């Protein structure tokens, strides 16, 4: 059973998402919250796998709530936004979000997104991954260091670069002429060695360390 929290300051939006998810087999809405403070408290009271998180809310915004929840629980955050280039989305990913979804996303896509995030994958389309990462890394001129990067094998290094280019596991498998299961294993090892929560955070690390540079093939 996938347990989900829904956080939005608009009651109609919260209720709508909750109704869609509750109607799906294997998904249970564990809590609803109207702002970031409520979300943090609820996330600590209820064990949830995924939290749908609005960004702009009173009391405490979704970015601060995301940072707190990802640092103190195992819940994964799926950001809800009205605009796909919302500047706050970049900060949310830095805060630990595993992806984002437009609020006008069709119900089937919402359900799919929750299942993908719960399964440990990141929910960012390849084109969105590139645009998102490049946008917020482009503003930084200083390269960061990430523990574990030097521990990657040559193959894992290769997989990380392709991940950062926005490729899915299937596309990486085709590129490297390997099985998709093998690629999943490599991805898991990359996340473990870099000590990051998911694919998005690994991609951020790849850009911030200079392993991959925006605009470079």
Image (tube, rainbow, N blue to C red):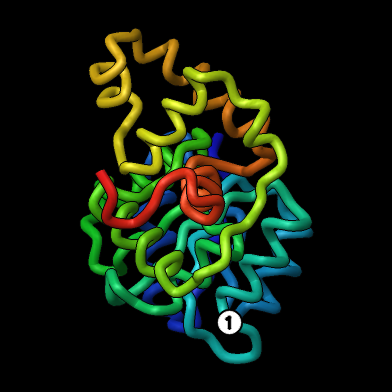
Between 164 and 144, which is closer to the camera in this rendering?
Answer: 144
Q: In this view, does 205 lie to the left or right of 115?
A: right
SS of the residue at dot 1?
loop
Q: Residue at x 43, y 83 (%)?
A: 10
Relative image position of residue 175 (x, y in whole percent): 25, 20
Q: Which residue is drawn at 77% across and 59% down?
A: 44
Q: In this view, does 122 lie above or below 162?
A: below
Which quadrant, please, contains the N terminus?
top right
Q: Is residue 116 above or below residue 143?
A: above
Q: In this view, does 90 lie above or below 152?
A: below
Relative image position of residue 20 (x, y in whole percent): 35, 55
Residue beneath disc 1: 61
Q: In this view, does 74 lie to the left or right of 4?
A: right
Q: Which residue is drawn at 49% across and 41% down?
A: 199
Relative image position of residue 55 (x, y in whole percent): 48, 77
Which quadrant, please, contains the C terminus?
top left
Q: Which residue lies furthest to the bottom in this view?
A: 58
Between 163 and 142, which is closer to the camera in this rendering?
Answer: 142
Between 32 and 150, which is closer to the camera in this rendering?
Answer: 150
Relative image position of residue 67 (x, y in whole percent): 66, 66
């Amino acid at each position: 059973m996938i347990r989900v929290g829904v956080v939005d300051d608009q009651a109609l939006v919260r209720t709508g998402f909750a109704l869609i998810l509750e109607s799906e087999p294997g998904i249970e809405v564990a809590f609803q919250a109207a702002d970031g403070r409520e979300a943090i408290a609820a996330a600590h009271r209820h064990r949830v796998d995924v939290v749908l998180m609005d960004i702009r809310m009173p009391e405490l915004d979704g970015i601060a709530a995301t940072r707190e929840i990802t640092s103190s629980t195992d819940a994964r955050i799926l950001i809800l936004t009205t605009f796909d280039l919302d500047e706050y989305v970049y900060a949310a990913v830095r805060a630990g979000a595993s992806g984002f979804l437009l609020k006008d996303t069709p119900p089937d896509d919402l359900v799919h997104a929750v299942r993908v995030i719960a399964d440990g994958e990141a929910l960012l389309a390849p084109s969105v991954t590139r645009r998102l990462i490049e946008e917020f890394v482009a503003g930084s001129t200083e390269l960061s260091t990430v523990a574990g990067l030097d521990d990657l094998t040559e193959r894992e290094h290769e997989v990380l670069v392709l991940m950062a280019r926005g490729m899915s596991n299937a596309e990486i498998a085709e590129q490297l002429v390997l099985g998709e299961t093998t690629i999943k294993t490599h991805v898991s090892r990359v996340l473990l060695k870099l000590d990051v929560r998911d694919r998005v955070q690994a991609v951020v690390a790849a850009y911030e360390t200079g392993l991959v540079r925006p605009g470079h093939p």
